[in-house]
Amino acid sequence: MGMMIEDDEENVDVLVPPSNFSTVEDGIFRSGFPHPSNFGFLETLNLRSIIYLCPEAYPQENMDFLDAHDIKLFQFGIEGKTESIPKDTITEALKLLIDVRNHPVLIHCKRGKHRTGCLVGCFRKLQNWCLSSVFEEYQRFAGLKWRATDLRFIETYEVICLRQCLYSIIYQYQGYGSNKRRLLYREESIQKPKIKSI
């Protein structure tokens, strides 16, 4: 027997995601700039933080929303029309992005295309995605406005420095006795002199 569901149009709150919204990974989202009409939708994500990639000040109404929902704002002022994305800034943003204590997290710039695309592209490299898949994802969000300079940035971005940073985080959380610790030592032994136990 079917159930009757009353559809009362008046009382339905329409949840509108920000432009170019998508899930990147569990607990990681991307979009264009969120406007007040998107706040209801953002509430459903239970965000803990926002990574904002523009130099412009965050609007007061957005700040009020963040304060009301105890959401941390991390701002990285990358210019929109820039030919070269600053590598160190992306690395700092990535460190925040991969720290699960900041999840659920929303990454956004103005349109969710170039700056956001570069950060997500570097994150994908950290996840060992092949470059053609990384580029395909970047271009899907950038549309006709994709930039060759962004693709070059993603291609040449070295994730090795970030991996080392990750290992040190894993050490802190895993302690000395775990298998993970030993696995990482094997990788590290390439750079470090071996200490023979007597």
Image (spheres, rainbow, N blue to C red):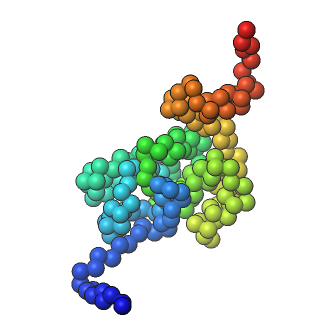
Identity of the residue drawn at 27% across and 50% down: 67
Identity of the residue drawn at 43% across and 43% down: 101
Visible residue check, residue 163: yes
Which quadrant does the N terminus fall into? bottom left
Residue 26 or residue 146, whichever sits in front: 26
Residue 198 or residue 115, whichever sits in front: 198
Which quadrant does the C terminus fall into? top right
Q: Is residue 195 left or right of residue 96?
A: right
Res 64 → quadrant: bottom left
Residue 164 or residue 174, whichever sits in front: 174
Percent position (x, y) of residue 185? 67, 27
- Up the image or down, 78 lies above or below 35; here it is above
Res 184 → quadrant: top right
Visible residue check, residue 152: no
Percent position (x, y) of residue 160? 67, 37
Percent position (x, y) of residue 47? 38, 54
Identity of the residue drawn at 35% across and 63% down: 44
Picture mark count:
0
Percent position (x, y) of residue 155? 70, 50
Q: Is residue 62 left or right of residue 23?
A: left
Identity of the residue drawn at 71% across and 31% down: 187
| Residue that lies at the very extreme toward the top in this rendered image | 198
- Up the image or down, 136 lies above or below 173; here it is below
